[in-house]
Amino acid sequence: MTERTLKVGYADLLAAIVEALDVPLPSLAYVDERRYYRLLEHRAADVRIAVGVNLAHSGDPWLAASEIRRRTAEEPVTYTPYEPKTDGADR
């Protein structure tokens, strides 16, 4: 891998990490908050595992990014996201 390819690979890996951890805030319902925290915890663990295994074995950032995206797709948002009121009450 050239240095440029490697830099692009690590940029893609960082983008995959951000995508995995950037989940919408939950509604104020208790069940949604619990699902939000559970999802965030699972995705953070998936990222940690994928990066750790990749570093220990191949060191290829493209493979780690691909694995993170695969795991993220398996754990979609299942809670109701927070929606701010649009009637001006939030001001």
Image (tube, helix red, strand yellow):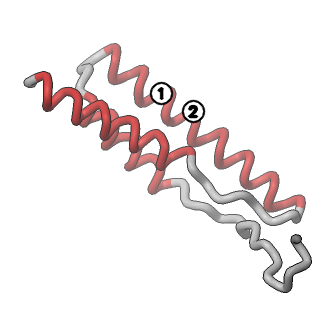
Judged left or right of residue 71, residue 63 is left
Residue type at tag 1: Ile
Mark 1 surroundings: few (<14), some (14-19) or many (≥20) residues within 10 A = some
* Residue 59 higher or lower than 15, as above or below: above
What residue do we see at 57% from left, 32% from top? 45
* Observer-nearest of 89 and 11: 89
Judged left or right of residue 3, residue 32 is right
What residue do we see at 39% from left, 43% from top? 15
Residue under pointer 2: 45
Percent position of residue 79, x then y:
71, 65
Judged left or right of residue 66, residue 2 is left
If the image is split into quadrants, where does the C terminus sit? bottom right
Judged left or right of residue 25, residue 87 is right
Question: Hey, which residue is sitting farthest bottom in the picture?
Answer: 87
Percent position of residue 41, x then y:
66, 39
* Residue 63 falls in image quadrant: top left
Distance between the Cα atoms at labels 1 and 2?
A: 6 Å
Which numbered dot is residue 49? Answer: 1
Q: Are marks 1 and 2 in contact (CB under 8 Å)?
A: yes
If the image is split into quadrants, where does the N terminus sit? top left
Say which element carries label 1. Answer: helix
Residue type at tag 2: Ala
What residue do we see at 76% from left, 67% from top? 82
* Observer-nearest of 22 and 40: 22
* Residue 2 falls in image quadrant: top left
Percent position of residue 84, x then y:
78, 72
Percent position of residue 62, x then y:
25, 36
Question: Hey, which residue is sitting farthest top in the picture?
Answer: 56
